[in-house]
Amino acid sequence: MLHWFVRCVTPAWFCWSLLLFLGAGGVAMAQPLGPNPFKVTLLGTGSPAPVLNRFGPGVLVQAGGKNLLFDCGRGTSQRLLQSGLKLGQVDAVFLTHLHSDHVVGLPDLWLTGWLEAAYAQRKGPLVVYGPAGTQALMTGLRSAFDWDIRARIADQQLSPTSILSSVTEIKSGVIYDQQGLRVTAIEVDHGELLQPAFGYRIDFDGRSVTLSGDTRFSENLIQKAQGTDLLIHQVAAAHPDLLKQPAFQVIMAHHTSPQEAGVVFSRVKPRMAVFYHFVLLGTPAIAAVTEQEVLALARTTYDGPMLIGEDRMAFELQSSEVKLLPLRTP
């Protein structure tokens, strides 16, 4: 059974590579989800680096008939289509914080999702939840793209209503509760000058996934994530020689190291822990830490089920396990 491999965690890359191989060969690609499906897809697992294997941060949660998007980094629109969704089928976007790598895909989703093309077709405003400053962001985007918006309304008769945005600026606590699907905002610690920043816990039908967002080691996240089935956590790492440089010290001070993430996993005890938003620092003179080194470092503080997240990796949260799904073919 393919779902057995979700328990294979050393080395994690082998498990995922094997699943990709099986999926590419057409094996078990049409497996139906269980009743009341709860699916989580890593659309992008990267950071600001413009690399091709890790697009900007974004996680798609599908449950209770809703499609919820958490962060909207570079390439999110492309990944959404690869996941089988029209851009207009996103019911709401939730932003962890307003760093550019987490929101740079938002104007693309907003504007392209407005079109009448088969891949778009949003009906009504784009619904956005985010920290203080989110309304200013969307207002600024409206101003920046005013020419495009006016031109398309006049030339293509696109709906003026569907290019609007509906923004809710959030605080900690339950911020969304519809059809049994509940989203709780968790305040995290991205640094003194980078507040507010949030992680999110999403609960549905007795199952849950928690997303860390960008954060340093966070006791609040550990507390709020207790009992979660799937914990998706960011990670940053650099070789010691690189950390002699102040610029890299600052970056690391805003994030969670692999060893610290291992402590988080050990205390939360999820059914599955997954790394995303990899901040792997390096220079031409000092090589970046690899994903396998991240896994090895995390293993010094955590011995439970754990995977290196990859773009398009998807999970089904079942009542008794977290099932790693075969890669969906476009």
Image (cartoon, grey):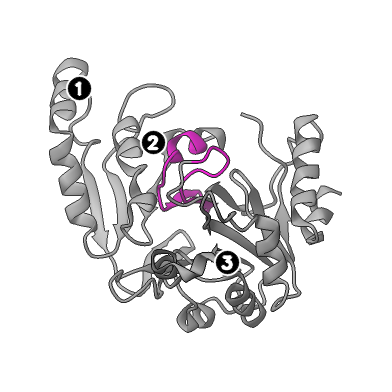
Element on which disc 2 rests? helix
Circle 2 crowding by C-alpha within 10 Å: few under 14, some 14–19, many from 20: many
In primary-sequence order, the first of circles 3 and 2 is 2
- Residue under numbered circle 1: 152
Q: Compare residues 4 and 49 and report the one nearer the observer.
A: 49
Q: Which mark is residue 176?
A: none
Q: Residue at x 42, y 49 (%)?
A: 48
In primary-sequence order, the first of circles 1 and 3 is 1
Q: Position of residue 142 (x, y in %)?
A: 17, 40
- Spot the residue most to the top: 155
Name the side, left or right, on which 94 lies relative to 135. Answer: right
Name the side, left or right, on which 214 lies relative to 125. Answer: right
- Residue under numbered circle 3: 208
Stretch in magenta: 51-80
Magenta stretch containing residue 200, yes or no?
no
Q: Compare residues 243 and 218 and report the one nearer the observer.
A: 243
Disc 3 marks which amino acid?
Ser
